[in-house]
Image (spheres, grey):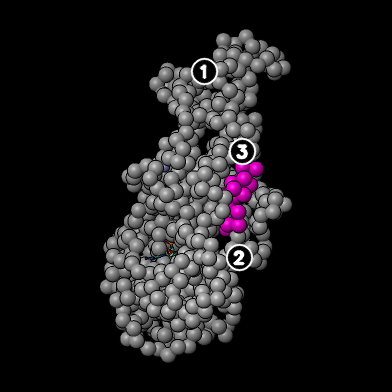
Amino acid sequence: MTEPHSPNAAPSAPTHILHDVFGYSAFRGAQAEIVDHVIKGGDALVLMPTGGGKSLCYQVPAIARHRREQGVALVVSPLIALMHDQVGALEEAGVHAAFLNSTLSLDDTQRIEREMMSGRLVLLYVAPERLTTPRMLAQLDSLHERGLFSLVAIDEAHCVSQWGHDFREDYLQLNLLHERYPDVPRIALTATADDLTRADIIERLQLQDARVFISSFDRPNIRYAVVEKDDARKQLLRFIQDDHEGDAGIVYCQSRKKVDETAAWLVTEGISALPYHAGLDADVRKKHQDRFLREESIVMVATIAFGMGIDKPDVRFVAHLDLPKNIEAYYQETGRAGRDGQPADAWMAYGLADVVNQRRMIDESPAAEEFKRGQRGKLDALLTLAEAHDCRRVRLLAYFGEESERCAAYQNACDNCLIPPATWDATEAARKALSCVYRFHQNGGQRYGAAHLIDVLRGKATDKVVQRGHETLSTFGIGADVSEAQWRVVLRQLIALGYLRTEGEYNTLELTASAREVLRGEVQMLLRQQSDAPKGKAKTGRVTRTARGGKDKPPPLPLDEQGLERFAALKAWRAEVASEHNLPAYVVFHDATLAEMAQAQPDSLDALAQIGGVGAKKLEAYGREILRVLEGA
Ligand code: ADP
Ligand code: ZN
């Protein structure tokens, strides 16, 4: 960390930096424009999906401005636990970076402050609460006076908004920077795309004059699939075993208890699973997060407390065992899969109980009615996505205001495009169900749950049916032709679409005002055909396997047998380097980079430099060793 300060040592053109420092051949999407704008001193708000490449949008300008003697860039990030690895990755690439947060010793803090004050540092990562301390502000004043405060990057900018679940009080103070140093360019970045959050960010960070860059939110390498919950745990296990043996993944559950139980169960099934939730001790959480980042095939079972800022590129799947809160949350959570651009899965198991629970949580919350209405609307959108029998990608993107074509032609098409599900016209069935609920109501005003309703519709004279005299209702047995499983789907859909509401401890069913539309036959309902798959068999498990042509984990590139051996040798070498440097393996090189090396077999440093992800510093540090590993393999 003590290289001499050498301005003008290297050219400051963005493409040169991209190539020389990061080893990449071209900017992606809007990156080039954003980078240019910020280097020139403009403010920017960047909305890009997770994995889109936000980091380069401020790192390249920081390096360019540093090379032009404009000093130190400040990166505000709420993710203290990840700063070490972020800085490690930059130092690996030969960029002088550091972080200041509460985990540092006094000695380290002072050393880093000296690096900052001398202008030698290129990037300094800080937690928001630290930024506004008198000490920090005095230091920034001094840097600023000497023209050595190059830019401010505000990562995870949605933390300034109270609309998301990531709100941080300290983010509200960040305005101060703008007021104090109006000439220092600012770039705010987030993967949260909805209008409310965006407006909040602009207002609270005073970014009214900033240029707004909105990228496409499509993640073409992610396959979206939703399966009917049958035996969710077993379905999950099958999904992991069939498609993701030995892969890193995240499994989201709603409650801490379910996280603990699911993780423990997966372990008994031979999967390296770890739990993560806010109820665990901080050091346990840190240990589990470190293992997830550093080891290759950990499955993290977690509540939504886990994940923000996790930039592990090779997460191969994100599975939801419970419904996420809304589409924004779903997209952010699933977006953590496949940042490296390689195929990845977003998988969700979903059933009637999920719908009922989520609705009840909203109904019973103490929030204002207006807020609840907003939440119900968001839940409806999510349920419609889950029940959809057409392209899920189109629906997701449409939700974010983006038009797209169905993903049939994608390498990783969604489940519905891959195998279009058969549908059946449930319009009549829906009417029968609602009129049966209506008859219950007429017949003594009592309400009943889904199981009883299905019994009556199917004409099953159970004790309860007979006791209540329901075998005499005109609706008794009118739905015998529809299977029990199909009835559950019909009811789920009716609840999801808001024609039926569940009430109280027993989730009894009640008509809503809009049920009338269905009863009058004004609403056509086309439902996904239930497969008659035997219990415990996840549909998409089989689908994915055939589509990928085998159970083996696909390497990032097609490699022959010797190529695979070289790939394995490179990975073994990388593991040693990573553990020596106390960094995750992907910080040294991504899998895709190693695979390209294994395939191309470069036999000189020049040839090696052509591989994507090999920058000048890494070439110098590791080039010879890599050539030796390749020769020996
Ligand atoms: P985000 O912060 O938007 O989620 P990252 O900045 O972590 O995304 O980038 C995601 C991945 O894409 C990283 O592994 C990064 O190295 C890679 N990447 C970003 N930009 C490029 C590019 N222009 N060429 C090649 N890889 C890139
Ligand atoms: Zn699709």
Q: Which residues are magenta?
A: 234-248
- Kindly identify the residue that appears in the image at 33 percent across and 67 percent down: 26
Of callouts 2 and 3, the N-terminal one: 2
Magenta segment: does it hold 240?
yes
Of callouts 2 and 1, the N-terminal one: 2
Label 2, label 1: how many angstroms apart (C-alpha)?
Answer: 54 Å
- Kindly identify the residue that appears in the image at 34 percent across and 83 percent down: 10
Tag 3 secondary structure? loop
Give x and y (percent) for residue 11: 31, 81
Q: Say which residue label 1 marks.
A: 432
- Kindly identify the residue that appears in the image at 47 percent across and 25 percent down: 424
Give x and y (percent) for residue 76: 45, 69
Mark 3 crowd level (few <14, some 14–19, many ≥20, 10 Å Cα): some
Is the C-beta separation of discs 1 and 3 under 8 Å?
no
- Kindly identify the residue that appears in the image at 59 percent across and 14 percent down: 477
Magenta segment: does it hold 79?
no
Quarter location, residue 390 = top left
On the rendered image, what quadrant is the C terminus found in? bottom right
The circle drawn on residue 295 is 2
Q: Say which residue label 3 marks.
A: 537
Q: Quadrant of ligand 1?
A: bottom left
Amino acid identity at mark 3: Lys
Residue 51 can be seen in this image = yes
Tag 2 secondary structure? loop
Give x and y (percent) for residue 241: 62, 49
Tag 1 secondary structure? helix
The circle drawn on residue 519 is none
Q: Nearer the viewer, residue 572 or 370?
A: 572
Amino acid identity at mark 2: Glu
Residue 377 can be seen in this image = no
